[in-house]
């Protein structure tokens, strides 16, 4: 107990293992807490002043997940029985299925929220409970209810509560009272009745001196009377209060007696009291050799959880994360509607081709559509995750003593957000591809969007861990997104960007002193060094290349050409092999000029071509079919190949293969990447970059969270 700023919460944090003292020790049964922090924290539970539960879950769900994490050794039936009893004890049984809700959406009263906050740790098996001002902001009746619940927990437990200025009834509920003055000075420790009596005597001495007389029991029923005595103002000879300036520049009444005076007075009172007591009745000092050795046997180090407990903890964290995300109604609606709405907008605006009617082959904006799709994917990933850690931080801080694996927490977040990313990417791809008539590329575009979304999720979670409030996180989204719009190589081509963006090359240029030492010429399609750190640069390059090389027409042409090359490499072909080779050459020619009355018929003919590629005999008439009247049919090239995309890739292939004699630089949209003398296929390399960069950010996120949790302990 003490005035604001006297160090109550700091003391509690020191006892909770979060704030090591500069001098002295915190002992638990004689064992230094900070000497064996990891093994002893399981016996201590710290209940913060602020609400630390998931507001998207119901009261019962919060308690169920808390019980699963705090008491994993109990069976499901035993945990449910404990939850039911605690709900009845907390007076929350009738509202057990109510979603808790945030402070802006009033569902539970202040007293009910406090009781729930306390109840989360009532299901644990700790031995020491530390409550930081559990009655702050509550009415007197709610405060009494909360303290009664806390008092009921004190059977065979150590319960410490910080409180500012309790009512007389609440004050008398406690077994012992410790009073702190400014600067953390200990000015009394004893029973509540002893405290009131002690300060009544102190007031009597101030008024009447040490002689007998006066009323020694006056004022001893009100706890606030203690502060009246403690902060007795200093007066001048005329009786007016003397004011002084505090450290904030404010005028406050000067105190008649300093905190050091009250500390020394209590020490003297305590010594005199101990002298009067017989030696046999004195309380033994904890920390003896017997206490240490016995505790060493009874208190083993923190043992690793069994694999079933590990799996159970992960599943609990995953379930809690998923239900919390699913329960957020407005956010869920926006999450599910944003993707198809944006796909419709982009597809409708960019449904334009150079021919009279819309034609995919001559569609002018397909590269732009692909890039904007990746922008949307990155944006959705960022917005889905940028406030997740911020919302969960109070719960994480509360559970830091419970050996909750942060790796499991991060993985649960990734999987939960990954499920929503899958739904969003599927909806976007279906709507966008339908409007722009992109056929046969669903899985390719979906994969690129999903990888980009997960990259945004990784960045968003990392931002969420580094900032303290949601508004700051939201403001950082444009800072992350806009550089990628500029440097990803879509809106502004790399050959049109400032050459000094290539920092390494610019530095090397500064040291070129003579034309004879001039560096090798630079390709216009080389990617500036700074742009390599933009995730969308890799996904956009891969998606455009895949659109050119993995469409249904190009894939089949490549498969047929591959079989032709293998058969042509055989020195002595048999008659069957030669016949197969001739059939494949004819099939390739037929496929390149394949035409049908409509898209459905063209798909049927392509399926027949697939059978021939798989080894079936080549029947030309069955594949070609009846002639199509001029201007009425569709060709495979019109349905599956976009000329703008093909031009981008073809230019890069020529640049990489033939540029300036034997030089083969890494160029944008080039088919291969060369690093450290090793050649990688571009699609595999870009996919690996996207996956590894996302997991690297998840690893950094884990390190940041561990550092933050450890920072709360040290």
Image (cartoon, rainbow, N blue to C red):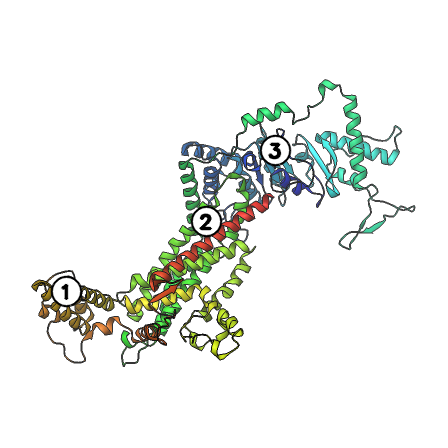
In the depicted view, which residue is nearer to us: 687 or 136?
Answer: 687
Q: At 41% across and 34% down in the image, what residue appears?
A: 76
Say which residue label 1 marks. 571
Q: At 75% across and 19% down in the image, what residue appears?
A: 278
Q: Earlier in the sequence, mark 2 or mark 1?
A: 2
Residue 109 in view of the camera: no
For the residues marked 2 and 1, what is the alpha-carbon distance in whole angstroms? 58 Å
Which label sits on residue 410?
Answer: 2
Could you say where residue 711 lies in the image, as x and y percent from the top left? Answer: 58, 47
For the residues marked 3 and 1, what is the alpha-carbon distance in whole angstroms? 89 Å
Say which residue label 3 marks. 159
The quarter of the picture where residue 161 lies is top right
Could you say where residue 190 lies in the image, as x and y percent from the top left? Answer: 71, 30
Specify the quadrant that holds the N terminus.
Answer: top right
Residue 378 in view of the camera: yes
Q: At 63% across and 29% down in the image, what residue appears?
A: 30
Could you say where residue 155 lies in the image, as x and y percent from the top left? Answer: 58, 28
């Amino acid at each position: 107990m003490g005035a604001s700023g006297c160090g109550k919460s700091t003391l509690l944090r020191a006892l909770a293992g979060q704030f090591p003292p500069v001098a002295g020790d915190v002992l638990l049964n004689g064992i230094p807490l900070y000497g064996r922090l990891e093994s002893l924290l399981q016996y201590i539970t710290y209940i913060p002043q602020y609400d630390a539960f998931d507001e998207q879950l119901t009261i019962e769900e919060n308690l169920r997940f808390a019980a699963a994490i705090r008491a994993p050794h109990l069976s499901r039936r035993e945990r449910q029985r404990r939850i039911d009893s605690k709900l009845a004890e907390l007076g929350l049984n009738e509202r057990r299925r109510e979603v808790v809700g945030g402070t802006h959406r009033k569902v539970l009263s202040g007293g009910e929220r406090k009781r729930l906050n306390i109840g989360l740790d009532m299901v644990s098996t700790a031995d020491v409970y530390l409550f930081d001002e559990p009655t702050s902001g509550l009415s007197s009746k709610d405060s009494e209810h909360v303290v009664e619940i806390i008092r009921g927990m004190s059977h065979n437990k150590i319960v410490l509560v910080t409180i500012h200025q309790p009512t007389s009834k609440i004050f008398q509920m406690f077994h012992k009272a410790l009073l702190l003055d400014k600067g953390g000075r200990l000015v009394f420790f004893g029973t509540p009745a002893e405290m009131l009596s002690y300060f009544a005597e102190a007031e009597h001495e101030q008024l009447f001196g040490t002689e007998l007389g006066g009323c020694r029991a006056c004022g001893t029923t009100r706890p606030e009377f203690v502060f009246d005595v403690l902060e007795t103002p200093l007066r001048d000879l005329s009786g007016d209060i003397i004011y002084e300036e505090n450290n904030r520049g404010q005028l406050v009444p000067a105190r008649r007696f300093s905190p050091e005076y009250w500390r020394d007075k209590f020490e003297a009172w305590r010594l005199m009291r101990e002298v009067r007591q017989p030696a046999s009745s004195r309380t033994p000092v904890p920390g003896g050799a017997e206490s240490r050795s016995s505790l060493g046997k009874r208190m083993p180090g923190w043992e690793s959880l069994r694999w079933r407990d590990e799996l159970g903890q992960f599943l609990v964290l995953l379930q809690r994360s998923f239900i919390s995300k699913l329960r957020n109604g407005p956010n869920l609606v926006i999450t599910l509607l944003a993707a198809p709405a944006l796909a419709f907008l982009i597809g409708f605006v960019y449904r334009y081709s150079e021919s009279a009617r819309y034609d995919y082959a001559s569609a002018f904006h397909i590269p732009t559509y692909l890039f904007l799709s990746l922008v949307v994917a990155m944006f959705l990933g960022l917005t889905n995750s940028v406030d997740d850690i911020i919302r969960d931080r109070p719960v994480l801080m509360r559970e830091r003593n419970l050996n909750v694996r942060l790796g499991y927490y991060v993985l649960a977040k990734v999987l939960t957000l990954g499920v929503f990313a899958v739904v969003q990417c599927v909806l976007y791809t279906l709507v966008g591809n339908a409007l722009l008539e992109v056929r046969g590329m669903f899985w390719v575009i979906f994969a690129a969007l999903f990888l980009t979304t997960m990259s945004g999720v990784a960045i968003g979670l990392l931002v969420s861990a580094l900032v303290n409030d949601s508004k700051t996180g939201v403001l950082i989204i444009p800072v992350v997104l806009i550089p990628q719009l500029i440097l990803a190589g879509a809106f502004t081509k790399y050959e049109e960007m400032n050459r000094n963006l290539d920092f390494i090359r610019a530095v090397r240029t500064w040291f070129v002193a003579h034309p004879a030492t001039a560096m090798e010429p630079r390709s216009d399609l080389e990617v500036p060094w700074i742009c390599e750190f933009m995730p969308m640069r890799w996904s956009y390059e891969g998606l455009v290349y895949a659109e050119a090389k993995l469409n249904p027409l190009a894939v089949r042409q490549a498969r047929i050409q591959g079989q032709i090359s293998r058969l042509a490499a055989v020195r002595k072909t048999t008659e069957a092999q030669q016949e197969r080779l001739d059939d494949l050459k004819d099939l390739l020619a037929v496929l390149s000029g394949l035409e049908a009355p409509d898209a459905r018929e063209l798909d049927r003919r392509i399926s027949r071509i697939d059978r021939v590629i798989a080894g079936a005999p080549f029947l030309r008439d069955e594949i070609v079919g009846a002639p199509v009247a001029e201007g009425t049919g569709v060709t495979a090239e019109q349905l599956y190949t976009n000329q703008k995309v093909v031009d981008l890739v073809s230019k890069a292939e020529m640049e990489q293969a033939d540029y300036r004699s034997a030089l083969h630089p890494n160029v944008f949209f080039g088919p291969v990447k060369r690093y450290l003398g090793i050649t990688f296929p571009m699609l595999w390399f870009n996919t690996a970059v996207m996956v590894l960069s996302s997991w690297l950010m998840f690893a950094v996120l884990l390190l940041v969270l561990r550092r933050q949790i450890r920072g709360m302990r040290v």
